[in-house]
Image (cartoon, rainbow, N blue to C red):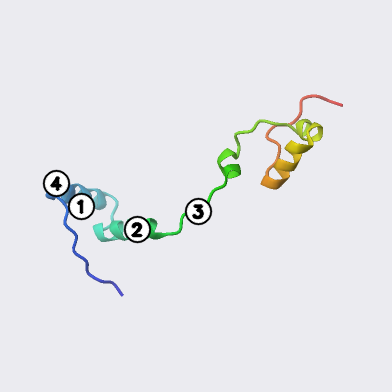
């Protein structure tokens, strides 16, 4: 069930938002509801590994030669970013 809520914003801002939502074929109410949903949803917790995802440049050979790197990659559930160019 929907509930009516009154908010107060400047007239200029109201015009801008209404124009924006006309272009998007939506309503100001839908926009406010979406913004409120985003504001109250539980944030996704990211780890330092998530922040670094994709920034490391390593090959399968690097993993074979460095056990610590190999363990980190396994823990992060990722794959080597490049194929080894070296043969052997």
- Determine crowd level at label 1: few under 14, some 14-19, many 20+ residues with C-alpha closer than 10 A: some
Q: Quadrant of residue 76?
A: top right
Quadrant of the snapshot with the N terminus: bottom left
Give the distance between the C-alpha atoms of the residues marked 4 and 2, in whole angstroms: 21 Å
- Determine crowd level at label 4: few under 14, some 14-19, many 20+ residues with C-alpha closer than 10 A: few
Rendered location of residue 32, percent (x, y)? 29, 58
Q: Earlier in the sequence, mark 2 or mark 1?
A: 1
**Residue in view at x 75 percent, y 39 percent:** 70
Q: How many marks?
A: 4
Q: Nearer the viewer, mark 3 or mark 1?
A: 3
Q: Quadrant of residue 78?
A: top right
Which numbered marker is on residue 18?
A: 1
Quadrant of the snapshot with the C terminus: top right
Name the residue tied to disc 4: 12
Q: Earlier in the sequence, mark 3 or mark 2?
A: 2
Which numbered marker is on residue 44?
A: 3
Q: Earlier in the sequence, mark 4 or mark 3?
A: 4
**Residue in view at x 73 percent, y 36 percent:** 69
Question: In the image, 61: left or right of 54?
Answer: right
Rendered location of residue 22, percent (x, y)? 24, 52
Rendered location of residue 2, percent (x, y)? 28, 72
- Determine crowd level at label 2: few under 14, some 14-19, many 20+ residues with C-alpha closer than 10 A: few
Give the distance between the C-alpha atoms of the residues marked 4 and 1, in whole angstroms: 10 Å
Mark 3 residue element: loop
Q: Are marks 3 and 1 in contact (CB under 8 Å)?
A: no
Q: Nearer the viewer, mark 4 or mark 3?
A: 3
Mark 1 residue element: helix
Rendered location of residue 37, percent (x, y)? 37, 60
Name the residue tied to disc 2: 34
Mark 2 residue element: helix
Give the distance between the C-alpha atoms of the residues marked 3 and 1, in whole angstroms: 31 Å
């Amino acid at each position: 069930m929907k509930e009516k809520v009154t908010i107060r914003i400047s007239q200029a801002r109201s015009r801008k938002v209404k124009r924006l939502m006309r272009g998007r074929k939506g309503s100001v109410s839908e926009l406010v509801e979406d913004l409120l949903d985003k504001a109250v949803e539980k944030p996704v917790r990211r780890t330092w590994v998530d922040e670094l995802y994709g920034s490391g440049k390593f090959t399968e050979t690097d993993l074979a030669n460095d056990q610590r790197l190999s363990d980190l990659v396994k823990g992060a559930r990722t794959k080597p970013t490049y194929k080894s160019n070296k043969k052997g």
